Image: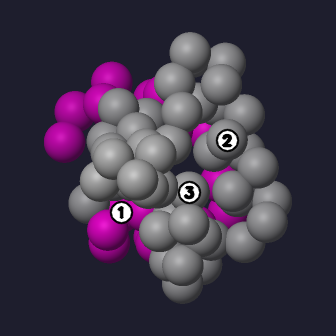
Amino acid sequence: MSPSSTNDLPKLAAPAQRALSNAGIHSLAQLTKCSEADVKKLHGIGPNALEALRRALTENGLSFANPNQL
């Protein structure tokens, strides 16, 4: 994986980084394919990580997937 593909994810605690990596999520673009509820269920994703992800998505004009459209 090239460094540029991970640069858009915010800095997160190690457990949250591992949770996303283990789920195959290495960029904000990949995160948009997941619902917030699904990300929240990942072991290692707590309220602070979820807020950081939400903020990073919003700052880039992105959002979590709508669970009704998955």
Identify the mark nearer the N-term, 3 or 2: 3
Query: Magenta stretch: residue 2 in it?
Result: yes
How is this picture coloured?
one colour
Residue nearest the observer in this picture, 58 or 3: 58
Residue nearest the observer in this picture, 67 or 38: 67
The residue beneath circle 3 is: 36
Marks 3 & 1, CB-CB < 8 Å contact: no
- Which stretch did the figure color magenta? 1-23
Q: Secondary structure at mark 3?
A: helix
Q: Amino acid at mark 2?
A: Arg
The residue beneath circle 1 is: 21
Query: Magenta stretch: residue 32 in it?
Result: no
Q: Secondary structure at mark 2?
A: helix
Mark in the foreground, 2 or 1: 2
Q: Is residue 14 visible?
A: no
Identify the mark nearer the N-term, 3 or 1: 1
Q: Amino acid at mark 1?
A: Ser
Residue 66 left/right relative to 1: right
